[in-house]
């Protein structure tokens, strides 16, 4: 029901494997923040225990933020990870929790040490780097292209698999 509510809201939701347990949501950076104008694809996974267990949330395209792991996109957000309550829903995640995360980064509990350090030591340079990441990775076309890139990566992998299976077939038929 939460997913359907999210789909009927203003958010663009793209289901994965035709299920409602894994999907991507288009998320726009909050107004009056360094992230304003940025657009991210947020990957959401719901466990069988949802809503009693928090959703798994991650940024699919890069973001420079102390509480987001740059490589995995995993979000370190206390409310989502430790303080989750079944009273919350997915709309809360996208309208309250993620905007607050971007508006009020917590450099004292980092997943991205470089961002946290830069934020504490040189706020001006930190702000500049956040804006550079937004310009480079958080545009609407990045979301569309990242889906195409993932599809082409999958095709490349399946081509590699079929190529290696041909080699395996040839090797298995070789004379002893």
Image (cartoon, rainbow, N blue to C red):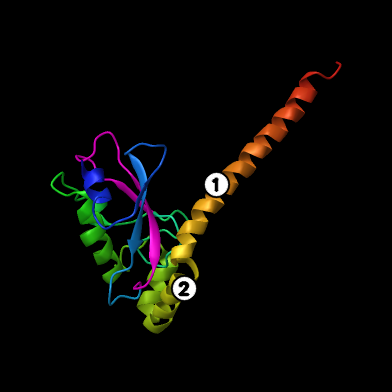
Query: Would residue 64 be counted in the magenta stretch?
Result: no
Report the residue at 74% width, 26% height from top.
Answer: 168
Q: Which residues are magenta?
A: 35-58
Instruction: Name the quadrant containing residue 20.
Output: top left
Report the residue at 52% width, 58% height from top.
Answer: 145
In the image, is residue 123 above or below residue 91? below
Given residues 18 and 48, the one toward you in this image is: 18
The tag earlier along the polypeptide, 2 or 1, is 2
- The numbered disc on residue 151 is 1
Query: Quick check: 38 left or right of 176?
Result: left
SS class, disc 1: helix
Given residues 167 and 38, the one toward you in this image is: 38
Report the residue at 24% width, 50% height from top.
Answer: 8
Q: Residues within 10 Å of mark 1 (few under 14, many from 20)?
A: few
Instruction: Name the quadrant containing residue 29.
Output: bottom left
- The numbered disc on residue 59 is none
Q: CA distance from mark 2 to mark 1?
A: 24 Å
User: Residue 19: where, in percent of width, then height?
Assistant: 35, 36
In the image, is residue 65 above or below residue 162? below
Query: Would residue 56 be counted in the magenta stretch?
Result: yes
Query: Quick check: 129 left or right of 176?
Result: left
Query: Quick check: 133 left or right of 8?
Result: right
Determine which residue is flagged by label 2.
135
Q: Quadrant of the N terminus?
A: top left
């Amino acid at each position: 029901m939460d997913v359907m509510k999210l789909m009927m809201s203003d958010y663009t939701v793209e289901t994965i494997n035709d299920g409602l347990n894994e999907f991507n949501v288009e998320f726009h950076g909050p107004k009056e923040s360094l992230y304003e104008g940025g657009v991210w694809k947020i990957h959401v996974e719901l466990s069988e225990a949802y809503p009693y267990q928090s959703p798994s949330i991650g940024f699919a395209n890069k973001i420079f933020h102390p509480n987001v792991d740059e490589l995995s996109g995993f979000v370190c957000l206390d409310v989502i990870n430790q303080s989750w309550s079944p009273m919350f829903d997915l709309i809360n995640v996208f309208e309250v929790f993620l905007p607050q995360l971007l508006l009020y980064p917590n450099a004292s509990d980092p997943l991205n040490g470089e961002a946290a350090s830069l934020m504490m030591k040189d706020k001006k340079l930190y702000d500049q780097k956040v804006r550079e990441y937004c310009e480079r990775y958080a545009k609407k076309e990045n979301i569309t292209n990242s889906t195409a890139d993932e599809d082409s990566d999958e095709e490349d992998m399946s081509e590699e698999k079929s190529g290696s299976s041909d080699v395996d077939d040839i090797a298995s038929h070789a004379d002893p």
